[in-house]
Image (cartoon, grey):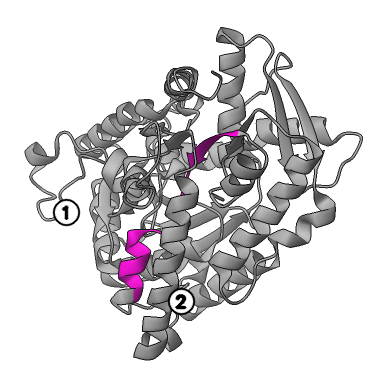
Amino acid sequence: KKSSEGGVDVVGGLDECNLQKLKKLSVIVYTADKPSGSFKQDLFEHVRDRFSMDIPPSLSINFVHLHEVKYLLEKPKRFTMILESLGTMQLAWNALHTITPHVFIDTTGCAFTFIVAKILAGCKIGTYVHYPTISTDMLSLVWERRPTYNNTSEITANPIITYVKMIYYYIFAICYGLAGSLADLTMVNSNWTKGHIQSLWKLARGGIHVVFPPVNTKILEDISLSDPPRENLILSIGQFRPEKDHILQLKSFALFLQKYDGEMKNSNVNLILIGSCRGNDDYERVDQLKGLAKELGIQDHVAFVLNQPYSVLQDYLGKASLGIHTMWNEHFGIGVVEMMAAGLVTVAHDSGGPKSDIITNPWDLKAPHKSSSNSNATGLLASQKEEYATAMYEVLKKGPLSEDMLKVRENGRKASKRFSDEVFMDSFKEVFLSSSLLK
């Protein structure tokens, strides 16, 4: 199975394995897209444009199209996790009934497909987990009755519904753990993900291996840190999904403009939100965000850039001074790494992968003027709009060419090299070739 980013990562890693050791490796990609005469070529071109990655012809890749049963992936309105999981099991049965591979690799996070692949089809299972379907943090969020995009205020306000949801979550978590433990090789994309998978997949064999996803840091390192000087642009990168919390970005930016209007007057600071929309729901969300920007009175300082090729993102990465990321418990944070590699001073959410793996030496906002205590800082962490607004002010007030900010940019770029394409390929090869999948 293949999801956009994880699938591309794994296909690239398999190509490296093929060149190194496996001369007859053949890859089958199950896809819900309709077939066409130019499907393979169009897909590879999209991969090149979107991820700046080439899939070489030396790797044998064939596609199994499951468009006729794509309805199995439709998201139900209630009992989403269990019904989606049952749908993926049916989809896996259709896929494996068409062609049954020796090794089944999942990059979508659908652990319940392992039951079909392992028990019914007899495949060995490899998985690259980007985000657990359920996590201990999700359980805590429901128990503490905190409202969020998938735990509405109607639920949190009713203790009976909350307890019923908790029982449902716990039962699902147990089933998810048992299904996930069928994997013969488990790779995860961050230490945050590893911690949650370890707590759920208690019977997992072969250990759980952290393999950071690849980021093309090399192409971004060519962007100059200071020539020409960066503009007063704040850049956000990410799909327009509810969990990305673009609302927090707009509210933080509005507070920044309101609180520091006098000191930042005539600075012409703008917020650019760049990302993709998956469908009508995302486009409607963008319209709602535009409405919120107007309501906050910041519409003239905010721009939305949708569904553009990688070259457009590169252009903005070369102009912006500051990057912003607001997703709570982001599993890794490729956008955060891209911004650091491009030389942006990056403010990420104080949780998940950005906290555990990426910005491990954050700038101390409580002592912003004591540069000696921040000499190793690679970025900043925040969680509330007040913290984000303060971070925006401290970074932009100093200016893009200040000694402090240049040091943070240099440190951030250096730290981003830990997540390069080369590091990923080496890590993937080491883990994959030493596993039991091909024995």
Residue where numbered disc 1 is placed = 365
Locate residue 57, reporting x and y percent.
74, 16
Frontmost residue, 345 versus 120: 120
Q: Is residue 187 magenta?
A: no
Q: Amino acid at mark 2?
A: Gly
- Residue 409 lies in quadrant: top left
Locate residue 236, reporting x and y percent.
46, 52
- Asked whether disc 2 touches disc 1, contact meaning CB atoms under 8 Å apart, the reply is no
Frontmost residue, 403 versus 4: 4
- In-image side of 90 versus 251 (left or right): right
Quadrant for the N terminus in the image: top right
- In-image side of 43 versus 344 (left or right): right
Q: Is disc 2 placed on a helix, strand or loop?
A: loop
Residue 196's place in the image compared with 1, above or below, is below
Q: Which residues are magenta?
A: 124-142
- Residue 343 lies in quadrant: top left
Q: Is disc 1 placed on a helix, strand or loop?
A: loop
Quadrant for the C terminus in the image: top right
Frontmost residue, 187 versus 279: 187
Frontmost residue, 296 versus 155: 155
Sooner in the amino-acid sequence: mark 2 or mark 1? 2
For the point 50% across and 28% down, which residue is it?
A: 216
Residue where numbered disc 2 is placed = 297
Locate residue 353, reporting x and y percent.
34, 46
